[in-house]
Image (cartoon, coloured by chain):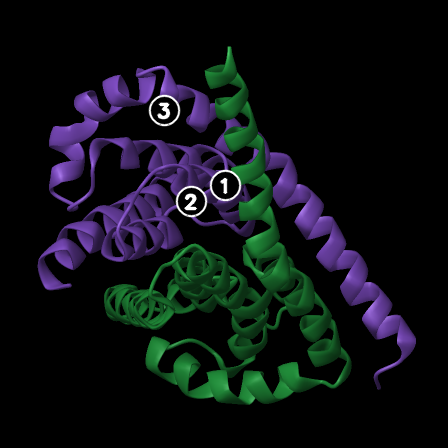
Chain colours: A purple, B green
């Protein structure tokens, strides 16, 4: 049954989530914006350009991909919104990140369930790479 | 230096805007999820997941952890999996297959909407994620022998 408590619980969860994502997105967006203006982002982009080319992404897309995998999706969002990307590129990054993100935390969770860490990492990173390559050709 | 001020205000303003864009989606979503929980809509989604368990070659009891993981995320799904395994409701083979599926595909509502908020194609994202995870799990299920018989 739905009571006032239901809404209250939902609002509390919602608020907590928004606070959590704000704590990550705002600093990431800020730092990436600074990097953009100090040419550091151009430098990163040049290094990763050959690697990102296969996915149809610019070199700076390495930033959301790395942040999403090491930290979480919120951090990746902060980076995605602070660099310039086309709708196709955002979709490719989104699919890649949806398969493979928050690796340290989520791998620990799957280990607790009893699935091999190596298997989980191979599957997730493998799916991300394959989906990125295929999507770039298909869409 | 006017330039530095512009960069800083861009850095803070843009970040706030991104948070707001996502908050507009996440906040109502969390309330809807609580309502869904209290209306027992999960049982209905669980029924919907039953054919999935058949294709994946896992026990019918896997439908519940599968649903929870798909809707609420890996941590919740894993919690239910561990609990079900302890209670003996989930055989080892099902446990591994459900975990593999959920590792690739979880929290699909929140993840999809968050990426849609920043401009991704949600239909593409959700379809590709679900289908790939399903096909992969089915393939592994064909290769994975019945673990319980080996004991």
Residue B15 appears anywhere in the view: yes
Q: Nearer the viewer, mark 2 or mark 3?
A: 3
Residue sitting nearer the eye, B70 or B87: B70
Is B47 located above or below residue A87 in the figure? Answer: below
Where residue B92 appears, as percent x and y from the top left, is: 48, 63
**Badge 1: few (under 14), some or many (20 or more) residues near its Cα, within 10 Å?**
many
Judging from the image, mark 3 belongs to the subunit labelled A
Tell me which chain the residue with mark 2 is part of: A
Q: Could you tell which of marks 3 and 1 lies nearer the N-terminus?
A: 3
Task: Look at mark 1 in the image and give the residue it sits on.
Answer: A72
Query: Dividing the image into 4 quarters, which one contains the C terminus of chain B?
Result: bottom left
Chain of the residue under label 1:
A
- The residue wearing badge 2 is A101
- Please, what secondary structure does the residue beneath circle 1 have? loop
Residue occupying the point 51% across, 83% down: B60
Give x and y (percent) for residue A67: 42, 33
On the picture, is A108 further left or further right than A33?
A: right
B41 or A114: nearer the eye?
B41
In the image, residue B135 sits, relative to residue A125, either above or below, namely: below
Kindly identify which numbered label has been placed on residue B50.
none
**Image location (x, y in percent) of residue B27:** 68, 62
Secondary structure beneath label 3: helix
Find the distance from the CA under tag 2 to the CA under tag 3: 24 Å
* Left or right: where A68 falls relative to B35: left
């Amino acid at each position: 049954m739905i009571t006032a408590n239901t809404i209250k619980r939902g609002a509390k969860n919602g608020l907590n989530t928004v606070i959590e994502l704000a704590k990550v997105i705002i600093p990431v967006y800020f730092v990436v914006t600074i990097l953009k203006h100090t040419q550091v982002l151009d430098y990163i982009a040049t290094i990763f350009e050959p690697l990102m080319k296969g996915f149809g992404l610019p070199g700076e897309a390495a930033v959301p991909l790395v942040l999403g995998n090491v930290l979480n999706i919120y951090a990746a969002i902060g980076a995605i919104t602070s660099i310039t990307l086309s709708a196709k590129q955002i979709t490719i990054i989104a699919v890649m990140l949806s398969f493979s993100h928050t690796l340290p935390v989520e791998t620990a969770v799957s280990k607790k369930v009893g699935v091999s860490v190596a298997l989980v990492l191979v599957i997730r990173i493998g799916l991300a790479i394959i989906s990125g390559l295929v999507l770039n050709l298909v869409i | 230096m006017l330039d530095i001020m512009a960069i800083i205000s861009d850095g803070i303003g843009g970040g706030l805007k991104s948070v707001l864009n996502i908050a507009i989606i996440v906040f109502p979503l969390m309330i809807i999820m609580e309502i869904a929980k209290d209306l027992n809509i999960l049982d209905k989604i669980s029924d919907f997941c039953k054919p999935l368990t058949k294709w994946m070659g896992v026990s019918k009891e896997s439908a519940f952890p599968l649903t929870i993981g798909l809707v609420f995320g890996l941590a919740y799904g894993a919690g239910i999996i561990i609990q079900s395994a302890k209670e003996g409701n989930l055989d080892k083979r099902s446990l591994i297959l459900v975990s593999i599926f959920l590792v690739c595909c979880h929290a699909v509502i929140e993840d999809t909407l968050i990426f849609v908020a920043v401009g991704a194609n949600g239909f593409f994202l959700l379809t590709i994620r679900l289908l790939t995870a399903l096909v992969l799990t089915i393939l592994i299920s064909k290769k994975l022998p019945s673990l319980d018989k080996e004991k």
